[in-house]
Image (spheres, rainbow, N blue to C red):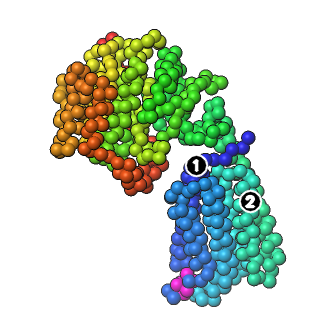
């Protein structure tokens, strides 16, 4: 069954097509400009008069439609219908301006032969005189063919749509070439023949490219989910943006790559989804479904948050206001309180594992993700948390995770959350070091620096310092107690919905650009240190 590309993918490919065509059009105009001045055999006035003729002006105008397309497609377009309308108008206008350019070339050639000083090169003048109108039909045909083949190669499209839009372009080209000429029938037939050939070539290219896309899409089918693009990768799997075949809702699908299929890894991955599915807090990512593909790839589907991780927020915008940090930490503390109440310890709380984005009519909604290192404090199950292994991320590791991993409890997550808060407020981790060992040594022996947040932020600074205490007994007693303390602080440091909306609105362009940029390796990484092997 043929499928259509998502709106985001279609817009991205149309923008790429417009950008490439702008470059090709501008480069051809530049070459023609240089040619007129290098080959020209007349005064400067003659050269300038040649540049002022309709043929050159319409050649310059041919750059306008792709530029307009590119500018329009820089902003999000509402539907695929609007995108196809932009595509149709832009491509047809591009073809039309190219045809008008070719249509004006005979007149330009006559003017050149009459005005230029050929001197001792009469043969060159004869060559220009002998160029007929039919030659420029070929010029128009090749120019429009290049346009259509490039579009077929870059823009996702069915063969039927490619034939339709290519046919529209060739009709415009044929009319432009034949209009107002005594040999209009002959020129229309000649242009139509070349046009039919270019339509066939474009359709063939579209068939091959679209067929390859369909093959890839079929290979990316996971049950009822279709993978669109990779949006993240962690120690326990790869995350894709996906769509459900029936519900038509955006979903995030996490799957375990084939090269990580050891029995213990599969057990941990499956246990992650089972434990996460038990949680229902509004600030914990919701699990929709999970299973295995026919070829044994394990996956699970969860809600998609169209936002950024807290790590990306700081990379994009720098240290955050204390009011916002208090609000974010309160949400995460609430999610941890529920997890801890059912005996689950996250063990890898960090900015990269907390998503933030607009959801449910609110603009700042935090979601805790990646329970891949979760530890079940009580109850039976697969032992995936060996006492001889340190798990977590160096910049956010509580001291007891290093010295006695078997003693980790809910207060360990609070240490990591305190380190996350420090990062949000300063843009830097609590401790810096050239090596993992140096960072871990600081967690064990160096007192966390006290933050200077002013009089209003003093309570927040004191609470974060308490979370970063070396002894778990000196930290808040529980995530629930931490949440209550943050709620109290938020009364004097409110972060309103208006504040959140203004932040996302003012940075919309920067956020869109950061999402479209190629993903780079995160500065945070999860490590597993075998203490028993030392």
Nearer-the-camera pick, 60 or 287: 287
User: In screen coordinates, is 220 left or right of 254?
Assistant: right
- Is residue 92 in the magenta section? no
Disc ID at residue 491:
none
Residue that label 2 marks: 164
User: In screen coordinates, is 188 left or right of 371?
Assistant: right
To which quarter of the image does residue 143 belong?
Answer: bottom right
- Span highlighted in magenta in the image: 46-51
Q: Residue at x 36, y 44 (%)?
A: 313
Residue that label 1 marks: 9
Q: Would you say the residues marked 2 and 1 are in contact, meaning their CB atoms lie under 8 Å apart?
A: no
Q: Secondary structure at mark 1?
A: helix
User: In screen coordinates, is 200 left or right of 308?
Assistant: right
Q: Is residue 510 visible?
A: no
Where residue 206 appears, x then y in whole percent? 70, 51
Q: Secondary structure at mark 2?
A: helix
Q: Residue at x 58, y 78 (%)?
A: 57
Where residue 325 appears, x then y in whole percent? 30, 41
Please identify the quadrant where the C terminus is shown.
top left
């Amino acid at each position: 069954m043929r499928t259509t590309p998502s709106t985001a993918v279609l817009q991205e490919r149309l923008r790429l097509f417009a950008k490439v065509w702008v470059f090709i059009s501008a480069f051809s105009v530049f070459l023609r400009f240089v040619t007129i001045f290098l080959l020209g055999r007349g005064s400067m006035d003659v050269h300038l008069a040649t540049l002022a003729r309709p043929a050159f002006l319409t050649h310059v105008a041919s750059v306008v439609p792709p530029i307009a397309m590119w500018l329009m497609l820089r902003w999000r377009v509402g539907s695929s219908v609007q995108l196809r309308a932009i595509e149709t108008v832009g491509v047809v206008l591009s073809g039309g301006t190219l045809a008008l350019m070719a249509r004006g070339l005979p007149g330009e050639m006559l003017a050149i032969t009459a005005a230029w000083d050929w001197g001792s090169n009469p043969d060159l003048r004869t060559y220009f005189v002998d160029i007929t109108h039919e030659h420029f039909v070929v010029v128009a045909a090749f120019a429009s063919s290049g346009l259509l083949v490039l579009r077929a190669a870059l823009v996702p499209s069915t063969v039927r749509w490619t034939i339709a839009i290519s046919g529209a372009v060739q009709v415009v080209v044929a009319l432009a070439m034949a209009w107002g000429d005594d040999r209009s029938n002959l020129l229309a037939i000649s242009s139509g023949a070349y046009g039919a050939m270019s339509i066939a070539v474009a359709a063939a290219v579209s068939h091959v490219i679209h067929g390859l896309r369909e093959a890839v899409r079929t290979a990316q089918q996971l049950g009822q989910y279709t993978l669109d693009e990779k949006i993240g990768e962690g120690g326990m799997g790869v995350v894709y943006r996906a769509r459900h075949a029936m519900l038509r809702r955006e979903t995030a699908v996490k799957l375990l790559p084939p090269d990580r299929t050891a029995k213990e890894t599969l057990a941990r991955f499956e246990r992650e989804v089972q434990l996460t599915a038990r949680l229902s807090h509004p600030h914990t990512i919701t699990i929709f479904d999970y299973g295995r593909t026919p070829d044994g790839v394990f996956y699970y589907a969860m809600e998609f948050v169209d936002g950024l991780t807290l790590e990306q927020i700081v990379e994009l915008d720098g240290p955050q206001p204390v009011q916002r940090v208090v609000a974010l930490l309160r949400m995460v503390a609430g999610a941890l309180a529920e997890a801890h109440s059912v005996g689950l310890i996250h063990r890898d709380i960090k900015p990269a594992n907390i998503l933030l984005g607009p959801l449910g009519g609110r603009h700042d909604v935090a979601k805790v993700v990646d329970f891949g290192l979760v530890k079940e404090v009580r109850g039976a199950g697969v032992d995936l948390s060996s006492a001889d292994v340190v798990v977590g991320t160096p910049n956010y590791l509580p001291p007891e995770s290093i010295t006695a991993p078997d003693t980790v409890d809910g207060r360990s997550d609070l240490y990591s959350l305190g380190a996350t808060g420090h990062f949000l407020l300063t843009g830097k981790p609590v401790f810096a070091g050239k090596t993992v060992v140096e960072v871990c040594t600081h967690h064990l022996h160096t007192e966390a620096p006290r933050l200077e947040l002013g009089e209003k932020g003093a309570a927040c600074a004191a609470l974060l310092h308490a979370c970063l205490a070396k002894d778990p007994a000196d930290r808040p007693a529980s995530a629930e107690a931490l949440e209550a303390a943050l709620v109290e602080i938020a009364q004097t440091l409110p972060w309103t919905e208006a504040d959140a909306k203004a932040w996302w609105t003012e940075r919309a362009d920067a956020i869109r650009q950061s999402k479209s940029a190629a993903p780079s390796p995160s500065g945070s990484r999860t490590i597993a240190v075998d203490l028993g092997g030392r």
